[in-house]
Image: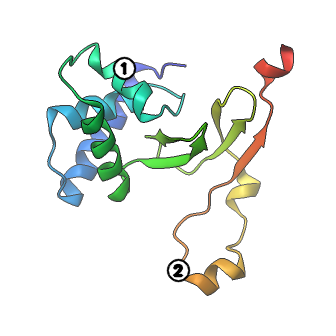
């Protein structure tokens, strides 16, 4: 599902601000990679993003897409949302939210949960170090696959 342009525009503003704060150079390739990622709720992998971006930028390489996604993730500008079919999937939505992952079609759906947001850090995680975020991933069969 495509995200409305007004929301993508706000995401792009946040992206530019985050890049400036982190000292990440803003390149045309990074802008287009992030714009494509922020424009969809699909949580695409690098190959999907590459195919879409090549329509606007025919010379962009898959390696460039991978390297930029990893760089943006290392600076906390995007996140990796799990592994699906052996490929990392990415998410531009850095607001607190959780994911429902369909085991049939590999769709990842964002959802909000006040109850999950109030979950305390597990003591075992605190024993390992300082927790920074808690993400919940629910695996199951999505409504579309249930209808089939």
Q: Report the side of 93 relative to 28 (left or right).
A: right
Which disc, if any, is residue 2? none
Where does the image place residue 99, in percent across and percent down from the top left? 65, 43
Above or below, comparing residue 133 to residue 49 in the picture: below
Measuring from the top left, give residue 14's x and y in whole percent: 32, 43
Write the residue at 20% across / 33% down: 29
Q: Quadrant of the C terminus?
A: top right
Give the image location of residue 6, x and y in percent. 38, 23
- Residue at mark 2: 130
Quadrant in the rendering for residue 32: top left
Residue under numbered circle 1: 51
Q: Nearer the viewer, residue 83 or 112?
A: 83
SS for dot 1: helix
- Residue 7 makes an appearance in the image: no
Instruction: Write the residue at 41% across / 29% down.
Output: 47
Element type where label 2 sits in the image: loop
Image side of residue 24 versus residue 135, left or right = left
- The answer to whether the residue labelled 1 contacts the one labelled 2, judged by CB atoms less than 8 Å apart, is no
Q: Is residue 22 above or below residue 97?
A: below
Specify the quadrant of the image occupied by residue 39: top left
Q: Quadrant of the N terminus?
A: top right
List x then y, in percent, for residue 97: 60, 47
* Mark in the foreground, 1 or 2: 1
């Amino acid at each position: 599902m495509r995200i409305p342009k007004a929301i993508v525009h706000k995401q792009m503003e946040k992206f530019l601000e985050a890049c400036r704060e982190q000292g990440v150079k803003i390149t045309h390739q990074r802008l287009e990679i992030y714009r494509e990622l922020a424009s969809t709720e699909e949580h695409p992998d690098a190959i999907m993003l590459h195919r879409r971006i090549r329509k606007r930028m025919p010379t962009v390489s898959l390696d460039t897409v991978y390297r930029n996604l990893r760089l943006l993730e290392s600076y906390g500008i995007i996140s990796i949302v799990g592994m699906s079919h052996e490929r990392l999937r990415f998410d531009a939505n850095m607001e607190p939210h959780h994911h429902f992952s369909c085991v049939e079609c590999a769709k990842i759906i964002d959802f909000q949960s006040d109850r999950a947001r109030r979950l305390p850090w597990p003591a075992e995680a605190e024993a390992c170090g300082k927790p920074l975020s808690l993400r919940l991933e629910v695996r199951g069969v999505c409504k579309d696959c249930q209808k089939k």
